[in-house]
Amino acid sequence: MALSSSNCSPYTWRMYTHTGSLEREKIGLLRASRAKVPAIARKLGRDPTTIRRELRRSRPRYLGYLPSITEKDTDKKRRTPRRQKKLDGLQLRNLVFWKLRKRWSPEQIAHFLKEAYPLDTDMQVSHESIYTYIFPSIRFKNLF
């Protein structure tokens, strides 16, 4: 597939990959030499947004970009599992199942819950959580 250079950014059609240790070191060296974000992005063949995001992750900010600290923080975040919200509450589960029986999609249910219960996060759930919960139930025929 050929891309026209007149209407596309040079970064279009490129799959995002996380920055690695070597790239972080290069960003740190270029940033220490006062290189601007667009220049760093060109040099590394990355989108400027990726570089900005990486620089924003660095802590503490008053010390500037420190690749080693950023690497440690990234490793720590990668190892920390995210808590997936389940349909734990009886009221939430009953409401979701009632909507599913009425042939609502998980996306419609999630949107409805967000609108109906804007301040009650216990009564909100993402469509991904609904799918995660109902697929095993469908497989073992115990949903309804």
Image (spheres, rainbow, N blue to C red):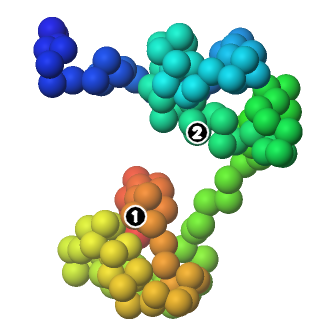
Residue 37's place in the image compared with 52, above or below, is above
SS of the residue at dot 2?
A: helix
Residue at mark 2: 53
For this orientation, the residue located farthest to the front is: 34
Give the quadrant of the C terminus: bottom left
Type of amino acid at the residue the image marks with label 1:
His
- Residue 11 image point, x, y percent: 35, 21
Q: How crowded is mark 2: few (under 14 residues within 10 Å), some or many (20 or more)?
A: few
> In the displayed structure, does residue 76 sit left or right of residue 23?
right
- Residue 143 image point, x, y percent: 41, 69
> Going 49% across and 78% down the picture, which residue do you hit?
124
> Going 83% across and 45% down the picture, which residue do you hit?
62
Residue 140's place in the image compared with 2, above or below, is below
SS of the residue at dot 1?
A: helix
> Going 45% across and 90% down the picture, which residue do you hit?
117
> Going 48% across and 29% down the picture, which residue do you hit?
48
> Would you identify the image quadrant in which residue 96 lies?
bottom left
- Residue 35 image point, x, y percent: 63, 21
> In the displayed structure, does residue 2 sit left or right of residue 93?
left
Residue 40's place in the image compared with 122, above or below, is above
Discs 1/2, front: 2
Residue at mark 1: 127
